[in-house]
Amino acid sequence: MSELTPNLEFTSSEPLYVQLYKYIKNEIKTGNLTVMAKLPSKRKFARYLEVSENTIESAYEQLMAEGYIESKARKGYFVCAVEQYHFSSSEEPIAEEKKHIEGMYLYHFTHSGVDIRTFPFSVFRKLTNQVLTKDNGEVLLLGHPQGELELRNEIAKYLYKSRGVNCSPSQIILGSGTQYLMKTLLQLLEGSIFAVENPGYHRKLVIFEKGMDKVRDIPLDEDGLILSKLKKSGANIVFVTPSHQFPCGMIMPIARRMQLLKWAKEKPGRYIIEDDYDSEFRYTGKPIPALQGLDKDEKVIYMGTFSKALLPSIRISYMVLPRPLLKIYQEDYFFYAQTVSRIDQEILLKFLQEGYWDKHIQKMRVVYRKKRDSLMAAISKYFPPCAEVIGQDSGLHILVRPNNGMTEQELIKKAADAGVKVYPVSQFGMNEGHTILLGFALMSEEELEVAVRHLSDAWYSN
């Protein structure tokens, strides 16, 4: 073991496995570890360094992913042949490499993940083969700027059935992700004053696009956006997530929704942008209709996505424009080419038409409910009574206040040192400084329990 003696800094903000990864990579680059040199076994190396085997495994996995070492069955880990002139003289990883390293955690509480274990790969493979045939050459050409009519028709039927949204297919516009559609909306509503939930998911994007002078922060109470503050703001456009406020998780009750609709119709030019991003997943109480379905005055712009319920990488979102805005869109923005692949649109169309979507949603409701329950049970088991949980009734994430005296950054650092990735809420405007966001869709029920145990050790052990 004498040839590998890394000096790991246990008090550093940099995770131990990253330190070990950098050390071994440098030993390979400088020639201290030669081609086919055998690395220590995970167990022996962990005992020697007095760290967990998971730390060694994470470092080895990163080195294998980048081609520095290889694993041979029942033999161990060995240094690969690497061309020396490809190395930079700097020891600091380039930006892309840094980003990849930072994602190498044992447990990842991302709020943008889905359960990839239950994704219907065989169905998508079958539908893809049906779409990609010589007889269906039209999918290789550009389609309608708003998205294919058949798909928009299926979406309209689904929205009416599941959320009470009243619209025609001609009012639906597809786009490659909600952020793209948001930027289109901000252009369409040029000259407006925009109100955003604070904290809220869209706050940063709207401020970035329009500037602070065009944006008004509206605080929340236990029912969501505070109407009295909105009325005083001077805004004519408001962004809301009423079915599951992001990130706080409250559900706007029907009374507050009706008050918001009344505000919108009081003056011309007022609109509500309703982001219904994960309304499929509600665990307690009866479903509440979408704001758009309650709107009789065409004041609600409804937005939804297939990314949360199906697959983040599919990048298919949609918005439903009120007819006055649709007319402007078709006059001024119809030259924009559709940003969603026509092939993906055709696959999704078949997925909807043949009943796979409904089956998938029903299945995922059960899967995510079980995960939510496992996460809550683990928190109850491993966290002390002082810890608080917020927003557990719907969606794919919760907020946790450990109430252990640590700041947000200290909580994130301690979790990272334990190999667990958690997320700050300050990026969404919540500035209280001691609340953490935990998404639970990506990990299994067993992984969620282990991850919470790691967090408990990191946050509450003396």
Image: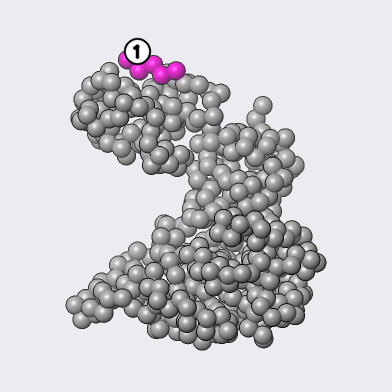
- Is residue 333 found left or right of 341 in the rendered image? right
Query: Relative to 280, does residue 437 appear above or below in the rendering?
Result: above
* Residue at the spot of label 1: 2
Residue at disc 1, secondary structure: loop
Q: Quadrant for residue 41, please give it.
A: top left
> In which quadrant of the rendered image does the C terminus lie?
top right
> In which quadrant of the rendered image does the N terminus lie?
top left
Residue 218 x, y percent position in the rendering = 72, 60
In-front residue for pair 280/202:
202
Residue 74 x, y percent position in the rendering = 26, 32
Q: Quadrant for residue 153, please give it.
A: bottom left
Q: How is the image coloured?
A: one colour
Tell me what residue is drawn at x 46 percent, y 39 percent: 102
Tell me what residue is drawn at x 31 percent, y 21 percent: 27
Secondary structure predominantly adopted by residues drawn in magenta? loop
- Is residue 27 found left or right of 133 in the rendered image? right
Query: Is residue 298 at all visible to an observer of this figure?
Result: yes
Binning the other alpha carbons within 10 Å of mark 1 as few (below 14), some (14 to 19) or many (20 upward) gives few
Tell me what residue is drawn at x 70 percent, y 68 percent: 235
Residue 370 x, y percent position in the rendering = 56, 58
Number of numbered discs on residues: 1
Q: Quadrant for residue 342, please give it.
A: bottom left
In-front residue for pair 205/11:
205
Residue type pointed to by label 1: Ser
Residue 46 x, y percent position in the rendering = 43, 24
Tell me what residue is drawn at x 44 percent, y 30 percent: 17
Q: Which residues are magenta?
A: 3-7
In-front residue for pair 381/410:
410
- Is residue 259 found left or right of 212 in the rendered image? right
Query: Is residue 309 at all visible to an observer of this figure?
Result: no
Seen from this angle, which residue lies furthest top? 2
Q: Is residue 6 magenta?
A: yes
